[in-house]
Image: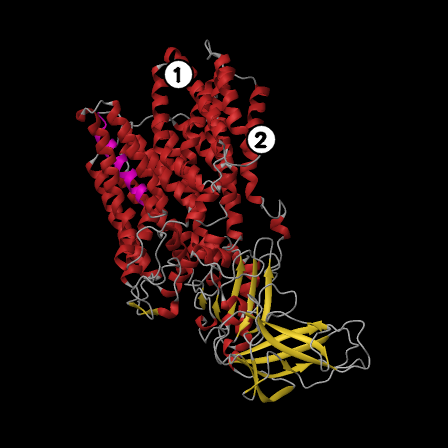
């Protein structure tokens, strides 16, 4: 059996214990007795409550065992530029409390308490009267089978892969490794809550405490299934079982969801918590007035899932804004009558109170340690938001399905097609251009969209006022409440974070709810049952055709197509992943030297994942060579990583090839041969990492030269010519390579260039020149400006002199060198043994055309 499958399966019993042993008990404690028969609702709560208890207990253990100090840091919060990662060599103290025995022992106690409460409820409360359940209709069975098949395929693909996406390597997978290795949560870890990282740690701790991506990723399928069950709970709780199954299928077979299931970040877990909280909150909100006990239970369950949401990612706070919006609408609806809106105020209050313990504990811990309570992403991400018509896909789909139902399904009355056509045309004018050509919607497009929505709403409202029955009005109200709950999150995502579809996952089930409701009312079992067999077969084929892209998308890769699973490069081939090739270079360095590398890698956030115990410094911002610590062995410059990281700190050094003003000594010094020993590039389609093996202390050692000058040759008393080498003195050669070494005596007063003139003996005018700054070669854009020269260091200058074709064969030539200002052209004064020698030094060698 392959390692990836073995590691995944080893973790399964311990995860099933958390869900079935811990979560199931507390699900039965929380749910009303009549809901115990609904396997979907029970499973939804079992997964969420089990994982919530597990991670809360692990947080208690991880914080109880945390380190007592950070060596060399001011406070326990560590590096404010990188609160997602830890540097193990700085940690002082700490106890290994995150162990298999302590974790499982705690969950056993939690489970026993839960099952004792279940037994008490069974003993105290009589079972509700049994209600006959309708059997599943054939298309419902087909949707469930598609969901199960798609989930199984995604589990296999997810289990086959290791952590690889940016956020997996930077934060979640990395933190899971740290906690597994240390047995506690370091105090310098902050920022994102720990719902998923602690699960990744749990799986690896259970897997004999070994760092193992396959074991860690075995937990992903549980939150994926949880999110599908939450969508079912939303549809079923507000409407009926059929709507719940359709909504679960819409979410589970949504191609974007299917593709992203292989990525171990926070968006699917966030969708799980947000959707489950929304389901039970709306169930409590819309409950009958006399169902007080059930309403309160649903509100508390909603609060617990809201806690899970906030324990997953701070953006879950959009739910709170939705609740506030709903309360405002309710107060207006009840005309400020306290007695009428109090029941729903109670729902909101209970939800908020139940959310606080799990939802607030991580943020409180961060504040107590000196971290920011919530760290917002850099503002430049907001500028990347698309805000195009494509982001309105779910509302547009709901409108399209509704119109199809109104005009195709059998009905006595239909909306006025003329006004509907006008509204549809205006909406199309507003959104279609930016769907075809992705861009932000312009003012005229927004105007057309707004006018179209106004016309459409007025037309459909007029139709509904006359033709909609009470059950339809009730459904419309519930859809409206769901829309209000999702609206603040949608606006925030659309305006600020619509650069990627995954960031909308939290509200996709809420946005898909109207589609599920309309489809459930259109394709009823009674209507389908009345069709003759060929028509039913066509219906089944149509469902399969719609579901197939989402069901099979896990087998597709955006970069490598449909055959990527069997055409992937072998494990030791890093040619298509620069970050892996980069990590391999440092592994080879350690194997060859027996010493771990000390790497300065500004902004290379993914690199520490591969060296949990290594010294990888990703937030150092060197601008001068003196800021490089003497123990550093490598410097990594990444595009776009390093450029973006410096820019976000307001620093714009002189990156070669980048249109930025030069002001950095260090980035120009990187090309010096007595600073950098080796330069290697790692490149893929997106990233370029240049690794410099460095030894900055070499710049204070005298480099070897062929001719060491006995005379003391100085230039304006800031530099001394130590010596030189040259490839020859025959001027018939295509070129003569020159190598000069200068000792820096004082800080140069200007940015000087070096002139190298070949002049006939006794004359002044050169026949050829090799002027310019100190740089690695003639084509280099960056150079080591004299304003960066440090006292005591040796500067090596290499350049190439090209003799002219018409060089006189019987004439002696000399090389004359000196410094001149690149600003005003003045030349630096030259002294030889303290005696003035004008503004240039003449080499003793004679050059001839031989």
| Furthest residue toward bottom | 710
Q: How is the image coloured?
A: secondary structure
Q: Which residue is mark 2?
A: 545
Foreground of the two, 379 or 457: 379
| Furthest residue toward top | 412
Label 1 Cα crowd, 10 Å radius (few <14 / some 14-19 / many 20+) = some
Which percent across, then down, holds residue 770? Answer: 67, 71
Label 2 Cα crowd, 10 Å radius (few <14 / some 14-19 / many 20+) = few
The C terminus: image quadrant: bottom right
Q: Please tell me whether residue 1 is drawn above or below residue 799 in the rendered image.
A: above
Residue at 75 percent across and 73 percent down: it is 803
SS at circle 2: helix
Q: Is residue 287 left or right of residue 806?
A: left
**Magenta-drawn stretch contains 518:** no
Which percent across, then down, holds residue 150? Answer: 52, 40
Foreground of the two, 183 or 331: 331
**Residue 524 visible to the viewer:** no
Q: CA distance from mark 1 to mark 2?
A: 34 Å
By secondary structure, the bulk of the magenta-drawn segment is best described as helix
Q: Find out whether the residues at labels 1 and 2 contact each other: C-beta distance under 8 Å.
A: no
* First in sequence: mark 1 vs mark 2: 1
Q: Which residue is mark 1?
A: 461
Which percent across, then down, holds residue 469? Answer: 36, 14
Which percent across, then down, holds residue 426? Answer: 50, 22
Q: Please tell me whether residue 590 is drawn above or below residue 178 in the rendered image.
A: below
The magenta stretch is 290-307
The N terminus: image quadrant: bottom right
Q: Is residue 201 left or right of residue 604?
A: left
Residue at 55 percent across and 22 percent down: it is 536
**Residue 548 visible to the viewer:** yes
Residue at 39 percent across and 57 percent down: it is 84
């Amino acid at each position: 059996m392959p390692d990836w499958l073995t590691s995944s399966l080893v973790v399964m019993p311990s995860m099933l214990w958390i869900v079935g042993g811990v979560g199931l008990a507390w699900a039965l404690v929380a749910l009303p007795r009549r809901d115990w028969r609904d396997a979907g609702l029970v499973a939804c709560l079992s997964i969420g409550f089990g994982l919530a208890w597990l991670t809360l207990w692990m947080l208690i253990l991880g914080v109880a065992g945390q380190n007592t100090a950070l060596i060399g840091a001011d406070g326990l919060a560590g590096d404010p530029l990188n609160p997602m990662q830890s540097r193990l060599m700085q940690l002082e103290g700490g106890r290994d409390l995150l162990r298999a025995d302590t974790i499982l022992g705690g969950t056993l106690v939690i489970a026993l308490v839960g099952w004792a409460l279940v037994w008490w409820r069974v003993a105290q409360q009589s079972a509700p009267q049994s209600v006959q359940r309708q059997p599943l209709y054939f298309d419902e069975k087909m949707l469930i089978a598609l969901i199960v098949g798609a989930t199984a395929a995604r589990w296999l693909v997810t289990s086959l892969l290791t952590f690889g996406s940016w956020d997996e390597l930077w934060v979640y997978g990395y933190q899971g490794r740290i906690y597994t290795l240390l047995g506690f949560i370091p105090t310098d870890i902050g920022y994102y809550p720990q719902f998923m990282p602690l699960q990744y740690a749990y799986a690896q701790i259970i897997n004999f405490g070994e760092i193992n991506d396959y074991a860690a990723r075995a937990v992903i399928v549980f939150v994926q299934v949880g999110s599908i069950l939450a969508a079912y709970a939303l549809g079923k709780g507000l409407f009926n079982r059929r709507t719940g199954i359709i909504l679960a299928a819409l979410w589970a077979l949504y191609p974007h969801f299917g593709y992203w299931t292989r990525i171990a970040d926070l968006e699917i877990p966030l969708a799980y918590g947000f959707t489950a909280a929304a389901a039970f909150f709306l169930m409590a909100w819309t409950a009958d007035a006399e169902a007080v006990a059930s309403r309160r239970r649903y509100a508390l369950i909603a609060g617990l899932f809201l806690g899970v949401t906030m324990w997953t990612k701070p953006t879950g706070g959009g739910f709170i804004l939705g609740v506030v919006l709903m309360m405002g609408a309710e107060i207006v609806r009840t005309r400020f009558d306290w007695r009428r809106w109090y029941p729903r105020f109670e729902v909101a209050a209970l939800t908020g109170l139940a959310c606080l313990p799990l939802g607030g504990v991580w943020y409180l811990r961060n504040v107590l340690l000196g971290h920011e309570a919530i760290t917002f992403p850099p503002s430049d991400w907001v500028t990347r938001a698309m805000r195009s018509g494509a982001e309105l896909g779910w509302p547009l789909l709901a409108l399209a399905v509704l119109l199809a139902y109104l005009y195709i399904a059998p009905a006595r009355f239909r909306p006025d097609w003329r006004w509907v056509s006008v509204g549809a045309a205006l909406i199309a004018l507003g959104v279609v251009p930016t769907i075809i050509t992705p861009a932000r919607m312009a003012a005229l497009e927004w105007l057309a969209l707004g006018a179209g929505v106004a016309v459409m709403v007025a037309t459909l409202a007029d139709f509904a006022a006359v033709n909609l029955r009470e059950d339809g009005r009730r459904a419309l109200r519930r859809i409206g409440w769901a829309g209000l709950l999702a609206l603040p999150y949608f606006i925030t995502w659309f305006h600020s974070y619509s650069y990627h579809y995954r960031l909308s996952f939290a509200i996709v089930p809420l946005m898909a709810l109207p589609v599920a409701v309309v489809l459930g009312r259109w394709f009823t079992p009674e209507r389908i049952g009345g069709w003759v067999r060929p028509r039913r077969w066509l219906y089944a084929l149509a469902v399969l055709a719609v579901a197939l892209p989402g069901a099979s998308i896990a087998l597709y890769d955006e970069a490598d197509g449909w055959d990527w699973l069997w055409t992937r490069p072998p494990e030791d081939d890093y040619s298509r992943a620069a970050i892996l090739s980069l990590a391999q270079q440092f592994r080879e360095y350690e194997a060859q030297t027996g010493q771990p590398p000390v790497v300065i890698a500004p902004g290379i956030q993914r690199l520490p994942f591969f060296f949990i115990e290594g010294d990888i410094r990703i937030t150092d911002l060197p601008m001068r060579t003196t800021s490089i610590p003497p123990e550093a062995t490598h410097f990594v410059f990444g595009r776009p990583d390093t450029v973006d990281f410096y820019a976000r700190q307001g620093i714009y050094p002189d990156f070669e090839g980048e249109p930025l003003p030069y002001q950095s000594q260090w980035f120009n010094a990187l090309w010096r041969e007595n600073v950098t020993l080796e330069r290697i590039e790692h490149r893929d389609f997106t990233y370029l990492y240049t690794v410099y093996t460095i030894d900055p202390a070499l710049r204070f050692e005298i480099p070897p030269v062929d001719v060491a000058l006995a005379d003391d040759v100085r230039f304006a008393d800031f530099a001394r010519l130590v010596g030189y080498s040259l490839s020859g003195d025959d001027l018939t050669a295509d070129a003569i390579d020159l190598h000069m070494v200068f000792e820096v005596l004082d800080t140069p007063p200007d940015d000087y260039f070096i002139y190298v003139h070949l002049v006939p003996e006794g004359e002044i005018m050169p026949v050829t020149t090799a002027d310019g700054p100190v740089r690695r070669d003639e084509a280099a854009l960056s150079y080591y400006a004299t304003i960066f020269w440090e006292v005591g260091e040796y500067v090596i200058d290499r350049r190439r002199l090209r003799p002219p074709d018409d060089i006189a064969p019987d004439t002696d030539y000399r090389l004359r060198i000196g410094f001149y200002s690149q600003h005003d052209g003045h030349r630096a004064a030259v002294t030889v043994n303290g005696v003035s020698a004008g503004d240039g030094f003449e080499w003793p060698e004679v050059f001839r055309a031989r």
